[in-house]
Amino acid sequence: EELEDLLFSTETTCRVPGGGGEMTEPLLASSVVGGDPVAPPLEPLAAEGEAAGAAVAPAPAAAEATADAPPAYSFKAFAMELGLGRFVAALEAADLLGNYVDTCESPLTLFAPSDEAFARLGALPDDLQVLRELLCVHITLGSLSHAELLNTRSITTISQQTHHVVLADDGQKVLQVGSASLERTDVQLPDGRGVLHVIDSVMCCIRLLQNCRYEQVWNKTVRPSPKVGLAGEWRKSQDELHAILIHCDTWQPRFQGLRGSVVPLGVGGPAGEKAHKSFQATKNTFQDGTVHFSELLILEKPPEMSKKKRKKPEDQLADGSMSQQPALDGNQSSNYRIMFSLYRRFEPADGA
């Protein structure tokens, strides 16, 4: 696949026998390429009557306000003036407004779906934790302007989901972040609290519902078979969910390392079926927002598992040195992650 078609991804980890290490937790606790998570994961919503945790500790409580003190910052009042009432309502329902957006000490970048986008989506998720995770893929730490987004290939949200950033080559040169396009950009939040971009759709959230075992065997189907939940908006005729084998140490993808790794998100989407015969031959399913990789199989034996062979005399060169065969790093583990990524197939223009 062309990486330019990648929209966003999250990852979990499986391992083939022969290596050590720890596995990555599901979404909201997964590791990030290049280092530690930029923000702690959200705690699960507390049961009724219990105190709920927060993703990032709010600012310390200030002293009691005096009559002369300026009014407290309210993102709700600010966003309502922009016509983003449904985004505000969703943040309130997920308990992210007063407990996070209003009180976070770090500047934020907010990708706010328009009211039209929420109307197209329909009802929000009933499960509060799913709703919270869905909204968290619209928030990143730090203030990222339109110009700064143009100079990056990906961003990581506070839920540790990665969004690919691309300038859509559709004649209008609209910047696309994940599955959404930016409609209005660089709306500065008050008091240097960050920046807001209005987007045309509710971004898709990838959630790992069923993880696979830590130990897996090459040339065998992954067990238990992974289940991935989707929330938000996607295009049924164009979007596909891919499972990709990633080496934990080098972060190198093995695009041909898995079979049964592509699931079109439409009901019998013609583009996905024609392009991926492996999908037709498997029982992978997508129903009610859940992708079930029931026949995901590890095809390739990782080279890290190959036995080291002694160099033969014929490998010795005339000057007495040995031929420069690629050496296998003995410290390199055989740990692999399965990264789940959403791809969008763009229809070629007429005459192209």
Image (cartoon, rainbow, N blue to C red):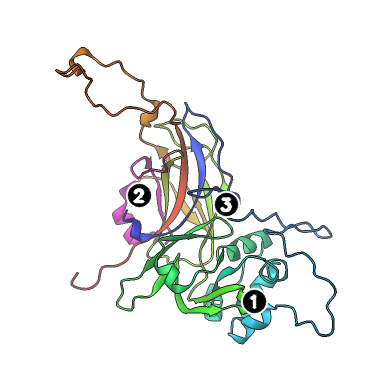
Q: Is residue 338 above or below residue 334?
A: below
The residue depicted at 26 percent of the width and 16 percent of the height is 311
Q: Could you give the CA–CA distance between mark 3 and mark 1, rounded to whole angstroms?
A: 26 Å
Quadrant for the C terminus in the image: bottom left
Which residue is under mark 3? 37
Between 107 and 235, the one nearer to me in the picture = 107
Residue 214 percent across, percent down from the top left: 54, 35
Q: Residues within 10 Å of mark 3 (few under 14, many from 20)?
A: some
Which residue is under mark 1? 88
Sooner in the amino-acid sequence: mark 2 or mark 1 = 1
Circles 2, 1 touching at the beta carbon (< 8 Å)? no
Q: Is residue 292 above or below residue 102?
A: above
The picture quadrant where one finds residue 304 is: top left
Residue kind at label 1, given as amino acid type? Val
Between 126 and 83, the one nearer to me in the picture = 83
Which residue is under mark 2? 280
Q: Secondary structure at mark 2?
A: helix
The residue depicted at 60 percent of the width and 49 percent of the height is 29
Sooner in the amino-acid sequence: mark 3 or mark 1 = 3
Q: Residues within 10 Å of mark 1 (few under 14, many from 20)?
A: many
Residue stretch rendered in magenta on the structure: 250-279
Disc nearest the viewer among 2 and 3: 3
Q: Could you give the CA–CA distance between mark 2 and mark 1, rounded to whole angstroms?
A: 42 Å
Residue 235 is a magenta residue: no
